[in-house]
Image: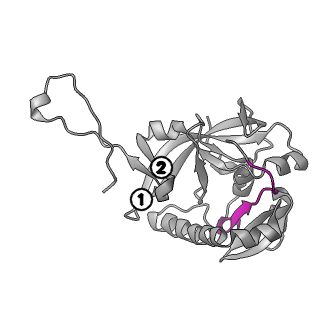
Amino acid sequence: MARPLSAVVDSGSPFTSISTRDALVFGIPIKTLDKELTTRLAGFTFYSKSVKSTLLFRDEANNVVKFDHDIRILIPTKLDRATIGQVQDIPSLVGTDLIEDARLTFVYNPSALLAYFEQNTPQPTPPSQVGANASQQAPQRNP
Amino acid sequence: MEDIADEVRGDKMANMSTDAEVLEAIEKTEKNRNWIAKNYDKLRVQYEGKVFAVKDEKVVESSDNVEHLLEEVNKKGEDTALLVIESIPRKGVAYIL
């Protein structure tokens, strides 16, 4: 299944997660999922379930860039309507796990209204450094 | 870890597989999200504390609760894959994530 999702990039979150609201909108059966891990977010306690997924991003050249990544689905500890109503404002998150696993750099300049990901590309080792221990990787924009 | 795709209900974009289909879906969503951002102050007056569904730059349904919203949207025969579903917190509420 593939469908668009908006998420907040949260450098304070170790996990990339789908919010309860988005899980319900996607039709994910949160009431029957296994509850693997207890997670706290925005003052609420959730269970979470890890699932395999492929995340699709659009780059500035209008190409689709794909990352296979495990994401967590957030399940409220109580599944009654009142509790779901309390957590429905909490967004889905892109956490540091995806940023690290996909070798991305997150560029954020709020004063310039700029925020984007760059995909890190290993730089070829210059001939003069062959055999040395130097290994540097400079972030590059996607072509 | 398991693939739960089989458990999820099908919809128009459930089998979206080509890059063109993905880009089209992103573009449609982006248009509706830009409309929400542009009209946020007006939307806040009407939908503060609520969750609402936007299609083609128009609110098609709203509710206090996302489960009820989805029930109403399904009754109308709307495809949730084509909707942007958003909420506006109550005044005085801010989330630290």
Q: Would you place residue B47 above or below residue A108 in this image?
A: below
Q: Residues within 10 Å of mark 1 (few under 14, many from 20)?
A: some
Seen at 53% across and 37% down, the residue is A96
Q: Position of B44 compared to A59: left or right?
A: right
Residue placed most toward the observer, A34 or B23: B23
Instruction: Examine the rendering and report whether any part of residue A64 can be seen.
Output: yes
Q: Do the residues at pointers 1 and 2 share their chain?
A: yes
Seen at 46% across and 58% down, the residue is A112
The type of residue carrying mark 2 is: Tyr
Task: From the top left corner, tell me how far across and down residue A15 is, in percent.
Answer: 59, 37
Task: From the top left corner, tell me how far across and down residue A121 is, in percent.
Answer: 31, 43
Magenta residues, start to end: B78-94
As for residue A48 lying within the magenta part, the answer is no
Residue placed most toward the observer, A63 or A143: A143
Q: Would you place residue B20 above or below residue A51 in this image?
A: below
Task: From the top left corner, tell me how far across and down residue B9 is, in percent.
Answer: 71, 57
The type of residue carrying mark 1 is: Asp
User: Does label 1 or label 2 sit earlier along the sequence?
Assistant: 1
Q: Which residue is mark 1?
A: A59
| Chain of the residue under the numbered disc 1 shown in the image | A
Instruction: Examine the rendering and report whether any part of residue B73 can be seen.
Output: no
Q: Position of A26 compared to B66: left or right?
A: left
Residue farthest to the front, as pictured: A111
